Image: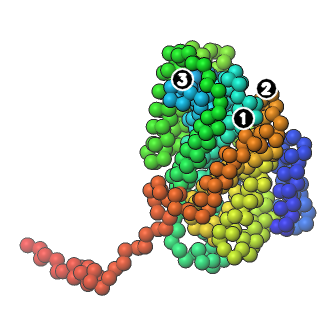
Amino acid sequence: MGAFGLLLLALALVLMMGTGWPTYVVLLGVCSIGALVGLATGAIEPHMLAGLPDRVLGLLNHDLLQALAIYGLVGALLIRLDLASDVYSGLRHALSRAVPRAAAPLSGLLLGALLAPINGSVGASLMTLNRSTARGWAADGMPPARRTALVAVASTLGVLIPPSLVLLLLGDAMLRAHTEGLDLARTLALPLASERIRVINTQDVVQAVLPPAALLVAGWLVLCGVASLRDPLPPPSAPPPRRARIALWAVPAALCALLVLVASGRVRAVEGAASAGVALLAWGFGSRQLTRARLAEVLSDAMSITGVLFALLIAATTFSLLLRLLGTDHLVADWMGAFDSARSAVLAVLGVLLLCAFVLDAFELTFLVVPIVMPALLSRVGDAAWVATLVLLVLQLGFLLPPFGYSIVLARGQAAEHPPWRALVRALAPYLLSLLAVIGVVVAWPAPTHWLRSAPVHLPPADAMDAERIEQLMREMSKPRDSAP
């Protein structure tokens, strides 16, 4: 019945693309059909489904899920407040002295690198960037295709830069998948079972992804600057207001400090997100932007986002449990064994994830697909943090690939002038090629993902007890006790 599970997954993907129904509704509906078929054919025993409530309750008790509500609040605040516009105007004025032609596009990319990691989702980041930058770019005469591409590209930076919610949830999913993969390797007596491999945690993923993320951001900044060399010289910009000058220094300093603390493990990512939420509330009240009516809108948006994410989490957890009961995970493990090398298996899984990224967003892919394909892959590949880095890069690529990429489709839909696809592809091409180059470097040379990692991939061997040490211990144990007076 493992193949039947894959058919159910394919049916769910088709319904998501063709109906426009909420993802959690599709998953629960298809899951119900699959469970009924499994019960009718005897593939699933009724008592197996009794563990679902405990599984869901145990999942909801996870500390990391506090981040869902916190990031929902942060994203809603950034959309409703003018903080992004303040930072953008401050960055643009500061850069206009050094690179006047490239000041506007570079400010947009830097704004994405600063705010996208705490925005909660690619959609929220895109709406924030579109609201704060696209109008200014249009007034500067930037072509619609180019500004649409820049908004889409900048909005995906939150996938890679911590404390991104996507990164944190994927790190937690990879921890579970790595544990199951090592257990599967022991069960099947695979070569990986004989190695002393440490199960990764979210901190490992955060530290592994930072060097490739820094390389990608630097490359995109260079490409953006080069593309602006032929632009006409803009008129001198007026000095930004005092609020924008304060935001220019306060926001980057606070976010850079938060990034260092999270990457070094001194602050948990959830604590960092909570700190960002408190700081945004203080900024909103202090700048008198967060009125009572606007606060009600922010809380309503945050509750809606949180409710959708928790519904998706429960639906995806239920669906993945059904696939396990049907034996789909064992079927995937058998397919993984057919590859000649572990690298070939990694590339095959990345190809599947890229195709899924056309249909699923980051949360759906993390909750639904990763628990199915990753344990089988990690039973053959020991460096799970390297694999997680590749997953994040491929996920970002899927968001940007036209014509189905989530970010590029949303950016084009939000644009005041819908650019033709041909012009949009030309504007995106340099950024996509550089992203493909970074993926190729990480695939061929995993070493950069180890540079910042504070914990080893392999567990240190136990201290050996040589003959001299054993003899010394025996002499100490055999010393006569002092006689009592």
Q: Residue at x 65, y 30 (%)?
A: 231
Residue holding disc 1 = 146
Q: Answer above or below: position of 386 versus 64.
A: below
Q: Earlier in the sequence, mark 1 or mark 3?
A: 3
Look at label 2 and name its amino acid: Ala
Is disc 3 in contact with disc 2, using a CB cutoff of under 8 Å? no
**Residue 436: image x %, image y %?**
67, 54
Q: Disc 1 to disc 2, how far (Cα)?
A: 13 Å
Q: Which mark is residue 93?
A: 3
**Residue 180: image x %, image y %?**
64, 65
Is disc 1 in contact with disc 2, using a CB cutoff of under 8 Å? no
Q: Residue at x 65, y 50 (%)?
A: 435
Look at label 3 and name its amino acid: His
Name which quarter of the figure residue 164 lies in.
top right
The outermost residue toward the left is 485
Look at label 1 and name its amino acid: Arg
Helix, strand or loop at label 1? It is helix
Residue holding disc 2 = 416
User: Pointer 3: residues within 10 angstroms few (<14), some, or many (20+)?
Assistant: many
Q: Which mark is residue 275?
A: none
Q: Nearer the viewer, residue 457 or 30?
A: 457
**Residue 379: image x %, image y %?**
64, 69
Q: Is residue 77 visible?
A: no
**Location of the N terminus (image quadrant):** bottom right
Q: Disc 3 to disc 2, how far (Cα)?
A: 25 Å
Q: Between tags 1 and 2, which lies in front?
A: 1
- From the viewer's perspective, tell me whether residue 221 is left or right of residue 50: left
Q: Residue at x 68, y 46 (%)?
A: 430
Q: Nearer the viewer, residue 152 or 260?
A: 152
Is disc 1 in contact with disc 3, using a CB cutoff of under 8 Å? no
- From the viewer's perspective, tell me whether residue 461 is left or right of residue 417: left
**Residue 398: image x %, image y %?**
73, 49
